[in-house]
Image: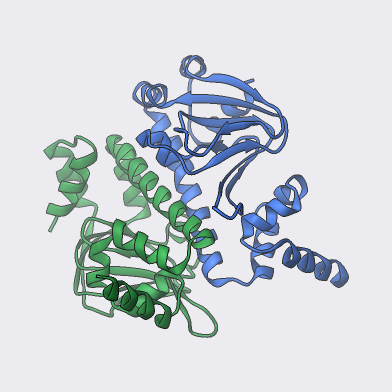
Chain colours: A blue, B green
Amino acid sequence: MYEVLHKKISELVTITNEEFEFCKTLFIPKKLRKKQFLLQDGDICKYTTFVEKGTLRSYTVNEKGSEHILHFAMEGWWIADLSSFLTSEPSPFNIDAIEDSELLLITLPSWELLLDKIPVLERYFRILIQNNLIATQNRLMGTLSLSAEMKYERLLNTFPECLQRVPQHMIASYLGITRETLSRIRKQRLSKK
Amino acid sequence: MYEVLHKKISELVTITNEEFEFCKTLFIPKKLRKKQFLLQDGDICKYTTFVEKGTLRSYTVNEKGSEHILHFAMEGWWIADLSSFLTSEPSPFNIDAIEDSELLLITLPSWELLLDKIPVLERYFRILIQNNLIATQNRLMGTLSLSAEMKYERLLNTFPECLQRVPQHMIASYLGITRETLSRIRKQRLSKK
């Protein structure tokens, strides 16, 4: 259950077996079936979650019922509403499973204990959050300045697995375009091949 | 010259005088007059920069000449193209001064040395980047889901100083709306008072 977590941490920093054994004691394993919720908007995000297997997404739903997707998280990724997790304020986000998933949950007090006891994990999370910030900034700049075609092209280049595993209407929501536009772009690409 | 940096670090972590004296040796002080560039697109972002005084912005310019603003940075904030800084790839961003500014620049090797020698700064940067990530995620979700009025309202609530110090056309570019729309929103707000 902890193989992917161990692999991912070891890619960025050096952690001893003893440290990782301690690390494991702080996580709560959880299985989620497809369509089950990890977080519903209005609730406090009590955990930050590591995905050992499967795919989750975080999204908001506006008053008209439109979904806006912030994140997909597959094996080896973390997912949470970071703001709600850190402040204990109610979250505007939903997090649910797109596939049957195996997760490792950690509460804020346990996460803080982890960072105190294993300082090298400060570096792990700093690098992780840094990469996430760069990706989010790129996406924001793309949203402000790129055409629908270019946004799709960029997603295809940076995150090809996503396009195979995530339903089309969620890809459209993630890109901030309509399903019709996405469908047109895909047809145009196929006819070019 | 280092007062704001010392204050800002001390707000998040405990740093000894000896550690901060070492820290100071790694920065390059620089003054920038209004409209001078710190980074021009196509160049590598060689520094991450702390603003002791003044205001900078980072932005892209598309082929039609439109500016898209990623960031404003005032006293106590950091600014860089993080991706170019970490990878030494050419940057698509410009960074210039909106006001006369006093800056502290640090190169990647010096920054890495700093983190090695003063591990508590791993925590400082982790928290800083984490807060930046939350703000960027909020802005991205706002761009996808909020009306122009609501985006302006949110900026007013979270970053009121920005509206006093930054020219209106830059605020419009930051919000991803036209100058005319911003002008209309401001008039409507005034007439409501």
Q: Where is residue A67 in the image (x, y as percent from the top left)?
A: 61, 51
Q: Which residue is drawn at 78% across and 68% down?
A: A184
Residue B43 position, x and y percent, is: 44, 72
Place residue B136 in its image quadrant. Answer: bottom left
Viewport quadrant of the N terminus of chain A: top right
Residue at left offset 44%, top offset 53%: B138
Say left or right for A142 vs A112: right
Q: Is residue B87 visible?
A: no
Specify the quadrant that holds the C terminus of chain A.
bottom right
Q: Residue furthest bottom?
A: B64
**In the rendering, at what x and y percent does residue B130 appear?**
39, 44
Q: Can residue B60 be seen in this view?
A: yes
Kindly identify the residue that appears in the image at 72 percent across and 53 percent down. Answer: A169
Q: In the depicted view, which residue is nearer to us: B192 or B72? A: B192
Q: Nearer the viewer, residue B166 or B190?
A: B190
At which x and y percent is residue A72?
Answer: 62, 44
A61 sits left or right of B39 in the view:
right
Position of A18 with respect to A97 (left or right) is left
Name which quarter of the figure residue A116 lies in.
Answer: top left
**Residue A47 vertical position relative to residue B113 in the rendered view, above or below:** above
Whether residue A37 is situated above or below residue A151 in the rendered picture: above
Which residue corresponds to the image point at 85% horizontal and 66% vertical from the top-left? A190
Label count reads 0
Q: Position of B166 compared to B81: left or right?
A: left
